[in-house]
Amino acid sequence: MRSKSSSLFPRDLLAQAFKESFVKLKPAIMIKNPVMFTVYIGTLIMLGVCIWIGAGETSQGSLTYNISIFAILLLTVLFANFAEAIAEARGKAQADSLRKTREDTPAKKIFPVGEIYTNEVKTVPSSQLRKGDVFLCETGDTIPMDGEIIEGIATIDESAITGESAPVIREAGGDKSSVTGGTKVLSDRIKVRVTTEPGESFLDKMIALVEGASRQKTPNEIALTILLASFTIIFLIVCVTLKPFADYAGTPITIAAFVSLYVCLIPTTIGGLLSAIGIAGMDRALRANVITKSGKAVETAGDLDTLLLDKTGTITIGNRKATHFWPADGIDKTVFTEACVLSSLADQTPEGKSILELADLNPNAFNTNGARFIEFTAETRSSGIDLPGGLKIRKGAFDAIRNLVTRAGHPFPEETAERVKTIASNGGTPLVVSQNDKALGVIELQDIIKPGIQERFDRLRKMGVKTVMVTGDNPLTAKFIAEKAGVDDFIAEAKPEDKMNYIKKEQQGGKLVAMMGDGTNDAPALAQADVGVAMNSGTQAAKEAGNMVDLDNDPTKLIEIVEIGKQLLMTRGTLTTFSIANDVAKYFAIVPALFITSIPALQALNIMQLKSPQSAILSAVIFNAIIIPFLIPLALRGVAYKPIGASALLRRNLMIYGVGGIIVPFIGIKAIDMLLAVFM
Amino acid sequence: MFTELTGVVVSFLLVVILAFPLGRYIARVFKGERTITDFMNPLERLIFRFCGIDPHRKMNWKEFLKAMLTVNLLWFVYAFFAFLFQAHLPLNPDGNPNMTPDLSFNTAISFLVNCNLQDYSGETGVTYLTQLFVITFLQFVSAATGIACLIAVFNGLKEKTTNNLGNFWELFTKSITRILLPLCIVMATLLAFNGTPASYDAKDTITTVQGDTVQVSRGPAAGMIAIKHLGTNGGGWFGANSAHPLENPNYFTNMLEVIAQMLIPIAMIFALGFYINRKKFAYVIFGIMTVGMLCLVIPTILAEIHGNPLIAKMGIAQPTGAMEGKEVRFGPAASGYWSIVTTIISTGSVNAMHDSFMPVSGLMQMLGMLVNAFYGGCGVGILNYYIYIIIAVFISGLMVGRTPEFMGHKVEAREVKIAALVTLLSAFIIKGGTALAAYYFVHHANADWAVKPSAWLNNPGYHGFSEMLYQYTSSNANNGSGYEGLADNNPFWNITAGFAMILGRYLPIIGPLAIAGLLANKKYIPESAGTLKVDSLTFGVMTFAVIIIITALSYFPPLVLGPIAEYFSIH
C-alpha cells in the first residue's frame, strides 16, 4: 500500500482539485484563511471597478488593464484554493486506497441467541456490522472490519495494509489481538469482536481530518496565522494611508494600483499554502503508513526531545544469535561444533536455529535415529540430546552445566569459566555445552544490532533528540548494547510502569517524549507520552491511548515521524520567510510605478528598468500569483530536513529562502515584464 | 576632516569602554550584590518606609504593570496642572505665561513618556519651577521607569519558571539612587565648569560689541542637561537645545553629551549579559545594534561632509560640508553623528537643526526612530528589540524544525499576538497620523483653526511631507526631536502627537513585559542540539533582517514621498 509513485499530481487528482478550487470560493470557506480572504475582497473590488469602467468611468485606466488585474487576482485566489485542494485530494486518495480494501466484504456474523453465543452464522455485508458484533473468519476470508480476536489464533496476511508479505500471527488475549479490516486470514479460524462503528475507525477519522470538515488549526498554525494577519494589517495600513500621501504629492493613484500593491505586499504565498502544508504533513505521515489522530501530533513530533525505543526489533534484529564457538582447552573445534549442532537439532528457539546457522554444517549428515531429545525445562535450565550410542550432550546456562559437571566429579575448565564471564560482560549470553558431563566449551550468543542504526541515532542526536532503549535485559547487558548501538540512555529490566515513570520524569524536566507500544499495559504510558505511537497489531486499548497508529508495526517508525514533524514546521518557516522576503522586489516594482508620472526623479528607484508603470504593476501581480503554484510541490513534499545543528540549519534556510526570496522576484518580475513588453 | 572623524570614533569607543563596567555594575545592583553605592541603602530604606513600600513583595507582570501605570498617571495629573498654572507659581523670574490646555497636555505627556517633544520654547514657555520640579523630575522618573521595566523582563529571562518579575518600587527607586543620580551629579558638575549656567537669576542683559542690548536667558540648567542626556530624554532647557551655546558650550561638552546619552542604553545591553548570565547573547545584540547604527551613521556623515548638491551646482565650494543649521564649533561630522545617535537612542536632543540636514540624513534619522531599537532609549530600547526578537524567534524557530521557543519557553499564539499588536501599533500611529495631517493639509487647508493647515509647513513639497512624517515618527518613538519647520504648537499637533506619544510609550512597554511574564510562567524546556541558539550570530542576523523587513519596508512608501523623493530631485 505504501505509495511508490513519485508523481505529486496524478491526473485524476488534478481534475478533482481543479473543481474543488472553485467550490472553495464560497465566502464561508474563504474566511477561514484571513490572508487570502482579503485578496478575495480585493478581487471583488476589481470586479466592481471593471463594471464601473464598463459604465463609462475614465479615471481608472483602460478596461483591458483592469480586467487583467482582476483576472490575475482571481487566479491568485484559485491557486491558493488549488494548493489546499490538491493536498486534500492526495491525502484523501491515500486514505481511500487504504479504506477500499475493507469496503463491503462479506462478513460471517454470529447472531446471539439468548444469553450465549451460538454458532448461528449468517453472511452479511460488512457495512451492516456494528460495534460489539462478533464475526467469524476462516482460512481464506478477508477480515471485514477492525476488531479484536476474542477466540482462536490465526496467521494473517497484512500485506494489503503494510505491504509486508510475511504473514503474522494474531491470537486472542495478549498484545497481538487486533485485526484490521481488509487483511486476509491465511490459516485457522478466529472469532472477532468489532471494535468500531462504521465510519469511526482511525482511518475514517483521519480522512475527516484531511477533508477539512473536522480539520482544526494546530496551535502553531494559529500563532502563524496571527502573525501573518498582523503583517496583512500592516500592509493594509500602508495602502490606506497611501491615498492621503498621494493626494499631498498630487499623484492620482488608480484603484487597481492600490489593490495590486496591497495584494503583492501581504504574505499571499505562505497564506495560500499554509493549510496545504499542514495537510501534506498528515499525508506524509500516512504515506509512511502512520495514521495520525490530529494535526497537532505531527507538529509535536517535530519538537520531540526523547524517544523511548524497545530494544527488540528497533535496535537489535529480532532475537539473539550465536556469534562464536569457544571450545575448552584440548577440545577439537570440529568436535565441539558438532556437539553444538547435535544439541540444537531439535531446538526450535531462534537461538537454537542460529547455532545451526553459525555451524554451517548439513544437519542431515547427522544420524539421529533413535536419539532422544531433551526439552528445556525451568528446573534443568538446559536441553540436549541422548544418542543411541550413549552419548549425552547438554547445552544450557553456565551454572546449570557447571553443577552437572562438578556433580559428576569432573573439573570445570578454568578458561571456559573465564570465557563465560567475558561474554556476559560484553553483553552476550553464554551457553555452555557438555558431553557426558564433561564441559566442551561455550557458545556465545549476541544481540545483533541493526545495521545502520548507529547512524540513525547519530542523526537523532544531531537533531537534539535523546534516545532511550527499553529492554527486559539485566542492566549489564543493557548497558553494553546501549553503548554499542549508541543510544543515550536505557531502562533495563523494564516493567511497563518503568516506562511511565521515565516519561513523567522527562516531562517534568520540560521535555517532550515519544514512545511506541502495543500492549494494553503500554496504554497508560502511550497516553502519557506527548506522541504515543501504537502498533496496528496492538490491543484496542493501546490504539485508543496513543495519538498515532503505525500500520507497519515498525518500531523504527518513530524516527521517521520526528523527521516528518520537523519537515512540517520547517516548511512553514521557510515559506513564511520567502513570502516576506519577496516584498523587497515588489516594492521596487510597484512604488516607482505609482509615482513616476508625477515625480519623474523616482525613475532612479526603478532599478529593474520595468517598461511602464502598468507593466510593472502587472508583472508584480503576475509574479505574486504564479509563485503559488510553483511552490505547491515544495509545500506538499516539505523542505528537506538536514540534521546539521540548529544554527547551521537556520543559516542554510536563511540563505536559500531568505536571500533567495529577495533575489528570485527581481528576476521573475523582470522576466515577466520583458514578456509583457512583447504584447503591450 | 580627519580630526572631525577621529572625534566621532573616539567618542563612540569611549562609550563602549565606559558602558561595559557600568553594565556590570548595574547587574550587580539589581542582583542585590555589594556595590560601591551601598551607602545609598539608608536613603532607600527611608524612602520605602516613608512611602509604605515593602520592597521585597514579589510582583507578577500584571501587578508590576499596575504599579507602573498608576504612578505614571499620578505624575501626568501633577505635570498637567503645574504647566497650566505655572505663571502664578513661584520661581518665575522672567514672568513667563501659563500654558494653553492643549500645550500643557502635550508637554506633560511628552516629559512623562521620556519623549521630550517640545512645542514650546524653554526661554519663554516654562518657568524655573516647572523646568526643575516638573520637567527635570519627569526626566528622572521616566528614565527610571524604563530601566525598572527592562529589569523586570531580565528577571523573567533569568529564572527557569517564575511568576515574579521583581518589585516595581524597588527597581524604580534603585534606578534613580544607584544609577541616574550619581551619574548626573558627576555630569552636571562637569557641564557647570564648562560654562553651562546653574543660577536661579532671571535673564541677563548684555551689551554686544555693536552696542546692541541683548537679553540672555539662563537658569539652573546644568542638572537638567545632565539627566536630559543620561536619561535619554532630550528636552532642552533652551529652545535651541544642545545647539545653544549655554547648553552645549564647547567640543568637550558636545562629546560629553553625546557619550552620556549612549551610556546607559549600551550599559543595559551588557547588564543583560551579566544579569542573566548569557554574555554571548548580550554581545550579539550589541553587535547587531552597532551594525545597525553604522548603517545609519556612515551615509549621514558622508552626506553632510559632501555638502549640499544644490549649492555645489551653483559653483560654490563647500570645504566644511553642509553647514546650514549647524554650529561652527561642532562641524558636519560631529553633528551628523549626534543626529543619528539622538534618533536611534530616543534622546531627541539636537546640536544642529535636523530640518536643514541633507535628505539622506533625514532618511537615516527617521529610520533610526522607526526601528527605535539600535540601542534605543533608557531601558525601552531593549524592550523594543525584545519584540523583534520574539518575531524573529517565531519565524526562525520554525525554520529549524521546532515549534518556536525563546530561552527555554515556547512562544505561542498569545505571545505572537502581543508582539504583532505592538508592531502594528507603530505602523498605525506613524502612518495614520501622517495620513491624517496630509489629509487636512490637502483637503481642509483653510480650516479656521489656531493655525490653518496651509500654514503648518515651512517648506512645501517633499520636505514638508518629511516634516509631518518626522513629527509622528518622533512622537511614536518617544524621541522628541523635530523638524523645526513644522508649526506644531496648535491643538491639532499638540493633541494628535500627545496621543501618539502615550500609545508609543506604554504599549511597547506593556507588550514585552506581558510576553516576558507569560513566557516566564511556562514550563522550562532544556536546550538541545535541535534548539535554536538565540545567542548565535545567525540568529542576530535574522533579527536584523526582521527589523529591516517589518520596519524599513513597511514605511517605504511614505519615505519615498518624503526624503527619498527629495534626494532624487536634488541629485
Image: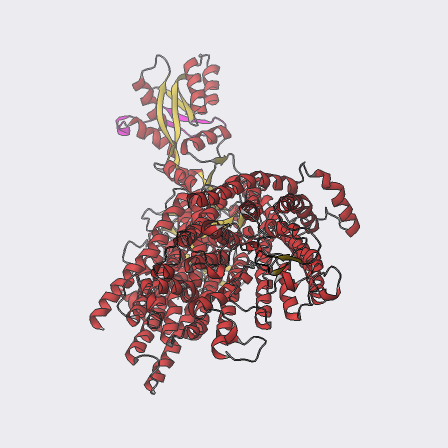
Callout count? 0
In the displayed structure, A671 sits above or below A373; it is: below
- The boundaries of the magenta stretch are A361-386
Q: Is residue B204 visible?
A: yes
Q: Is residue A546 visible?
A: no
Q: Position of residue B543 (x, y in %)?
A: 46, 51
Q: Position of residue A215 (x, y in %)?
A: 45, 64
Relative depth, front residue between B364 and A456? B364
Residue A357, located in which quarter of the rendered image?
A: top left
Residue B110 located left or right of residue A656? right
Residue B61, located in which quarter of the rendered image?
A: bottom right
Residue lying furthest left: A678
Does the segment drawn in magenta span residue A373?
yes
Relative depth, front residue between A128 and B150? B150
| Coloring applied to the structure | secondary structure
Q: Quadrant of the C terminus of chain A?
A: bottom left
Q: Position of residue B472 (x, y in %)?
A: 52, 65
Q: Position of residue A103 (x, y in %)?
A: 37, 64
Does the segment drawn in magenta span residue A494?
no
Q: Quadrant of the N terminus of chain A?
A: bottom left
Residue at 45% over, 74% down: A244
Relative depth, front residue between A320 and A616? A616
Residue A69, located in which quarter of the rendered image?
A: bottom left
